[in-house]
Image: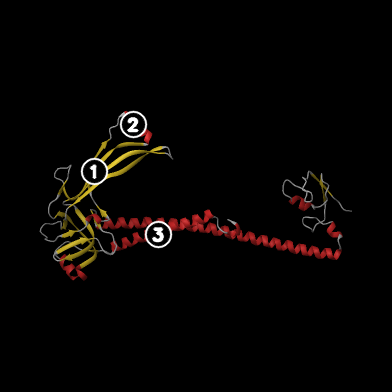
Amino acid sequence: MEGGGRPSAAQAALLVASTALTALVYSVYRQKARVARGLEGARKVRLDGDLRTVLLEAPGRCVPYAVIEGVVRSVKETLSSQFVENCKGVIQRLTLQEHKMVWNRTTHLWNDYEKIIHQRTNTTPFDLVPPEEGAGVTVRVMKPLDAAELSLETVYEKFHPSVQSFTDVIGHYISGERPKGIQETEQMLKVGTALTGVGELVLDNTTIKLQPPKQGMPYYLSTVDFDTLLQKQEANVRFWKILTVVFGFATCAVLFFILRKQYRHHRERQHLRQLQDEFRQAQERLMREMNAEGGETLKNSCVICLSNTKSCVFLECGHVCSCRECYRALPEPKRCPICRQAVSRVVPLYNS
């Protein structure tokens, strides 16, 4: 604690940082909880002949947040895999990722480093259709790349190690970077994949569309079923809730520590003021006694406490100025209060 009982700069900075961190974690928890509640309250609709009737009866021909499950089917042409034969889909993502080792000058270790150097995503319009044939109801999926969770299957993955000469190896050690190679990956959302869509369901003329919701809720296109998706979000909420409680307790602990320090400092100041008052009262009482008894009492009184009689001789200086109690209370190394000379020994003084 600094003077005046104020917290130190480090304590104040720790309290501010822990409070800000708790507020940040709490805001994330609130947002995750809102998403989970919205997902739990989403309306489940079936991809069947009654879907069009449901939308016609809904306000604005729209269900703001709906859950629908179906199978992926391309509207026009499909995308073919560049590496796997007879693999067709509606979303294709090609990724080139660089792998290398980077020297850390702080830990003096080589650390793995990954960086995407190229990524291209191709899409083609697609619908969600019922698993059974002949239902005649389709839902057009709009803006699939805006989905918060877009499940793509990895259909091809190959690592191309870098070829290095001896000169390259020496140069890489000097520069602090050692290339390992390039990883080539192809991911696709294949035709026939069972998909769970969560978003805004709207009837536009004769077309039923699934699109990102307008209330700020997340848009999902996931290969897992709705119950699994909901359980995943609830587990995420529990994690952030526990993190909020932990940081909250940490902030309370820091605050308690600072308040405890302030309370102890306040008690010490009160005790000091009490001692000062007692000393002042003792001085006033002594002055009254001296006025009543004359100056002889002051002459024989201890120069430190002004209450007890002088009862010891300090050597080698020879001063007679203190009582035994005040001599024992002098700090080490003991020095004469009159001349500040070091006291080598003390001889008791007896008044007859």
For label 2, the residue is 169
Q: Amino acid at mark 1?
A: Thr
The label number, if any, that marks residue 137 in the structure image: none
Residue 285 image offset from top left, x and y in percent: 78, 64
- Measured Cα–Cα span from mark 1 to mark 2: 27 Å
Query: Mark 3: which secondary structure?
Result: helix
The foreground one among 79 and 66 is: 79
**Disc 3 vs disc 2: Cβ atoms closer than 8 Å?**
no
- Please state if 301 lies on the left or on the right of 44 as rendered: right
Mark nearer the N terminus (1 vs 2): 2
- Measured Cα–Cα span from mark 3 to mark 1: 37 Å
Query: Mark 1: which secondary structure?
Result: strand
**Disc 3 vs disc 1: Cβ atoms closer than 8 Å?**
no
For label 1, the residue is 185
Q: Please give the name of the residue rendered at 32% of the width and 58% of the height, measured from the top-left corner.
A: 234
Q: Nearer the viewer, mark 1 or mark 2?
A: 2
Residue 230 image offset from top left, x and y in percent: 29, 58
Q: Please give the name of the residue rendered at 35% of the width and 34% of the height, measured from the top-left corner.
A: 172
Quarter containing the N terminus: bottom right
Q: Nearer the viewer, mark 3 or mark 2?
A: 2
For label 3, the residue is 26
Q: Amino acid at mark 2?
A: Val
The foreground one among 226 and 312 is: 312
Instruction: Check the image and name the residue furthest to the left.
Output: 134
Mark nearer the N terminus (3 vs 2): 3
Q: Nearer the viewer, mark 3 or mark 1?
A: 1
Q: Amino acid at mark 3?
A: Tyr
Question: Hey, which quadrant is residue 81 in on the image?
Answer: top left
Q: Is residue 106 above or below residue 140?
A: above
